[in-house]
Image (tube, rainbow, N blue to C red):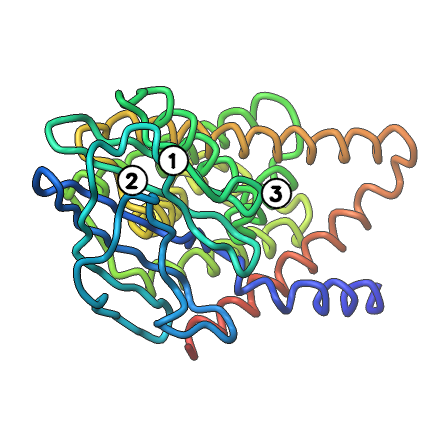
Amino acid sequence: MIRWLLAWLLAVIPAPLLADELRPVSIYFKQVGQAEWSLGWRQPVVPGATADTVVPILPDTCHMAEKPVYDVTPIAVGGRARVMCEGTLDTRALGWDFATPGEAILRVAPLGRSMQVHRLTPEKPMAVIQPRASAAQVWRSYFRIGVEHILEGWDHLLFVIALVLLVGRGWAVVKAATAFTVAHSLTLAAVTLGVAGLPQRPVEVLIALSIVFLAVEVARGTKDTLTRRLPWLVAFLFGLFHGFGFAGALREIGLPEGEVPAALISFNLGVEAGQLLVIGLALMVLAAIRRARPAAETPALRFASYAIGITGAYWLVDRLVG
């Protein structure tokens, strides 16, 4: 078991870079006059990136009217520029030159028309500006972002897995997962709409602490504790803090003006779809272990709780020190 735990720890050492991270490239292209556009972009820092090499790809009828103004921080490289374009940009392509794997969220705001939202990837680095914005673009883009966030955000992922391991089976899992969903949906909406907010660093610490807490509860076995009696309540309370984490990630991307409700709902639906997928897979693994070797269930749960707890503790210390 010690060897397995060491192997797990070595595997997740890079995970702090993924935990609660959703920081794609953000590009904003807004028309401010008949021929004038405002361009802004922001890219998370990657090794070897310098300010003057991080520039969006403009349509072929556009050019920068002045030298870009760059903004370099420890975590991101960005810039802004005034752009002049000839004629209409309908059917023209705008994009990003991907030097590393990742994705970009492109928001295009033509004068007097609804904002368009496009998701760019290394496989599809360019997007065509449409004559009319499609509401399906917003729903599709933000739903996919939500799914990817829960599947790539290891801290949220491990909390959900630990919750399944704690509850085990039946309607108790449904109740706990529903409580977690309701809680993080409330705080996500509150922060996004400007009703509430918390600093991101304490939120990240509390999220790591929630993982450690659940891992300890799973390791304690079937002892009668408040968490085992009322898992839905614990899931709800910690879900509030996870919602602040989701909101921080969504803030990095930004929301399209005029389409905030659609973007918020579709992002949340994507998070839930990814969460249900993880819960389903975890329940399938537990069921398979029970059928194949019932006696192996307790050792497997203990090993999983130690692995999850070690990971959560690592994040907790890293975030406290950082």
Q: Which mark is residue 107?
A: 2
Callout 1 amino acid: His
Horizontal placement of 56 versus 149: left or right? left
Mark pair 1, 3: CA separation: 32 Å
Question: On screen, 36 above or below 90?
Answer: below
Q: Are marks 1 and 2 in contact (CB under 8 Å)?
A: yes
Rendered image quadrant of residue 308: bottom right
Name the residue beneath numbered marker 1: 118
Name the residue beneath numbered marker 3: 161
Dot 3, how many residues are within 10 Å of its Cα: few (below 14), some (14-19), or many (20+)? many
For label 3, the SS is helix
Mark pair 3, 2: CA separation: 34 Å
For label 2, the SS is strand
Residue at 32%, 52% (x, y): give it.
Answer: 252
Residue 131, how many percent across, how many down? 27, 22
Residue 237 visible in the shown view: no
Residue at 54%, 65% (x, y): give it.
Answer: 16
First of labels 1, 2 by sequence position? 2
